[in-house]
Amino acid sequence: MFSWDLLANAVVAGLLIGGFYAAVSLGVGLIFGLLDIANIAQPAFVILGSYAAYVLNSSYGLDPILTGLLLTPVFYLLGAAVYRVYYTSFERRGEESLRGLVFFFGILFIIEVSLSIIFGVDYRLIQTWYGSRSIEFAGVGVAFRYLVPFVVGVAMTLALHLFLGRTFYGRAIMAVSQDRLALRLMGANPVQIKTIAFGVGIAAASLAGALLISIAPVIPSTDRDYIGRMFAITVLGGMGSIGGTLVAGIVLGIAESLMATFFGPSWSLAVSFGILLLALAVRPAGLFGR
Amino acid sequence: MKTGRTLLVALAVIVAGILLAKLRVNPYFYFAGYVILQYIVIATAWNILGGYAGYVNFGTPAFFAMGAYTAVFLIRSVHAPLPVLIVAGGLVAALLGLGIGYLTLRLRGTFFSIATLALAVVLQTAIINWEYVGGSRGLSVIRPSGPPFGNYVVFLFTVMGGLAVVSVLVARFIERSWIGRGLAALRDNEEAAECMGVPTLKLKLFATTVSGFFLGVAGAPFPYYVTFVEPNSAFALDYAVNALAMPMIGGTTSWVGPVIGAVLLGTASQLATVTISSEMNLFIVGVVLVAFVVLAPEGILGLVRKLRSR
Amino acid sequence: MAGPLLEVEGLVKRFGGFTALNRVSLSVKAGERFGLIGPNGSGKTTLINCVSGALPVDGGSIRFEGREITALPPHQRTRLGIVRSFQIPKPFTSMTVRENLGIPLEYAAAGRAGGEGSADADEILESIGLHAKAHLRPAGLTQIEMRKLELARAMAARPKLLISDEAMAGLSSTEVDDILAILFRLNTQGITIIMIEHIMRAVMRFSERIVVLDAGERIAEGTPDEVVRNPAVEKAYLGE
């Protein structure tokens, strides 16, 4: 049953959620796309951010975006610590591939199980003050619940882009991703730079998680829904092109939205998986890749 | 161990299994024993790809569940007998492995691993939407009457014991053959292996297919074991983490490691689940996994080897 | 055999916007000692990667013994007799030295008729001086022993064409002579050898013919004497 109205709504909804998906994937884009560290635990950190926001919201009534931002330093330190362990145990010994992957899976697993022990398997959601409102835009209803995360997502993308392009540490991260030797000649320590990058990537998860729980209900196993999405977006976006991540996020969001509108919502995960496989088969370097 | 002696041990194990079945000890023993034997198959299967070739499969639940749901489908549609269920379950899972392998093994191992992680989620969604096998509500399965040993769980216990023996023998055979040597070469350095004449893609596809086959085989008797099959239990996270942890703890370079890991971790898990809680058990398994990966990556076998060479 | 053993024609290789090889052609005769030199980044290793099959090409063709091999995967080229050693040794770390040789013997050399008979791993290890360490893992080898293992592994693959990629980098003078002697000996046994090296005295002594690459293009070809006197070569190495 097709109508232009339905299509327009689907596209707009997809666009908005896509911006959010991009925000969620920024961490992976940074850590996996640029630094080539297969951090499959990223979705778990996002969910951790969601639950942290939930706790602070239900105890103190804090707005999730505020919480997300406030907790960024905490998550940054957490990310730095995780990277240090990863580096000492694996990267330094040159055994990244097999064991590093299993290590991150272990982290993902421990976080998910811990959350389910502490919070159980009930769905949690944060009702924001703007959550129930919406505006009309060119005949299409736009819910604030999706619009705000979209805006924040775009802002995060922009912020990260500026960070990587304009600041010393940001440029150092770009340099590390391309040529470790050049970085050393520059006088910076690659390990320190990667620690910072990893920390930033996990810090991004904090805010992304807070956004997530204001959009849709969350349970500990929600992280697994995002694995396919995050990596599909990162690969499609070009493995480290931050702008590409945003575009890829929107592409995925619209694809999922169209699928959900015309074929039913339960197949949305298949969309990201399909896009991931397609992106890997066609262009491992993605749309914008190096 | 020489081949002749190994086959003798295998035979002894089978005989022991049958004797145990006939003895009819505490019924819980067969329930728990089935789980541990099932994990021997799972860990061994996982290790054929993970330990021998170095490609990590995070989507074990997908393959296990494919075996289970193939069985459900065949039970419901044609009341197929258990041997058919096992072979069919294995074949479907093998095809799944081949498919995923074909799509991702030309790229780095990391992408294969990520794809397997996403695969489990997607397949679960697909099964949830398939009403014929129960969808999200699940499906009841009635065990056939008149099983050997008089009790179906006891019977399944011996069947799984037989499957464990077969899977271990196959793994051992592969490990010691030219295929196993080629897999070890590509695990150590894939580029060099390819340049030394090893057809790496073909070997990887072989390993993925065989690994998938035995994971499916492990899942095929599951419907009769639980009698009520629903996606959450067939796709349980337990399979994902145990399939990794058991070979890692035991040691990944040989067929012995997964067996040790399955027996040790399987028994400990059963105890923990009963005495504490199943979730705490999972938590502990996760911590143990990370501890081993960081501190003792070669597992118990590696530690033993180090102690011996002192 | 009438034609050249290896014929590379108009080879093009790009990495994104960067052209690493720009229509490079060369041909190597059977039994020849061939040198490939050029400043850093000139495309030597890229060329070797294309010939061995590690990298797909964007244009041009590669023929071995008259047969088009441009589409073949690396392991099949090895089985045909094109074997390369790696600049940074890539041993199989979980295997002993002997087992390292076992892999090419089993996969590359098996079933191929001809060559110098059925010399097994021990013979090769003896000839190269690694026999005493045959039971050790690569972790227990010194730098030069690792390089020798790299060569020994290549020998075990029964090459018709051996491509030695900077096997001597960072070695002492005596060690260089050691490796050179091995390569000379392999050549007298009938193996065609392409040597990529920065150590000029080795290349000059070893090569019958040299091709010089610079910035992805062939700028000179000839005997060692001719190449050394070529002003274009001097400019490439020393700049204007």
Image: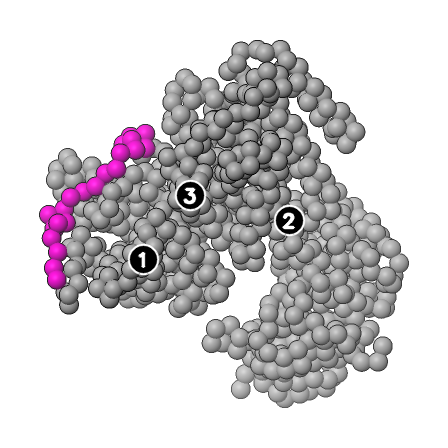
| Residue B197, placed above or below residue B185 | below
Q: Residue furthest right?
A: C117
Would you call the spot at circle 2 few (<14 residues within 10 Å), some (14-19), or many (20 or more)? Answer: many
Residue drawn at (32%, 52%) of the image = A264
Query: Mark 3 and 1 residues: CB-CB less than 8 Å, in contact?
Result: no
Q: Which stretch did the figure color magenta?
A: A116-136
Query: Mark 3 and 2 residues: CB-CB less than 8 Å, in contact?
Result: no
The amino acid sitting under disc 1 is Phe
Which of discs 3 and 2 lies nearer the camera? The answer is 3
Which of discs 2 and 1 lies nearer the camera? The answer is 1
C-alpha distance separating marks 2 and 1:
39 Å
Q: Give me the disc on residue C25.
A: none
Residue drawn at (40%, 62%) of the image = A236
Q: Which residue is mark 3?
A: B130
Q: Give me the disc on residue A262.
A: 1
Would you call the spot at circle 3 few (<14 residues within 10 Å), some (14-19), or many (20 or more)? Answer: few
Would you call the spot at circle 1 few (<14 residues within 10 Å), some (14-19), or many (20 or more)? Answer: few
Between residues B288 and B38, which one lies in front from this camera angle? B38
Q: Which residue is mark 2?
A: B206
Between residues C130 and A160, which one lies in front from this camera angle? A160
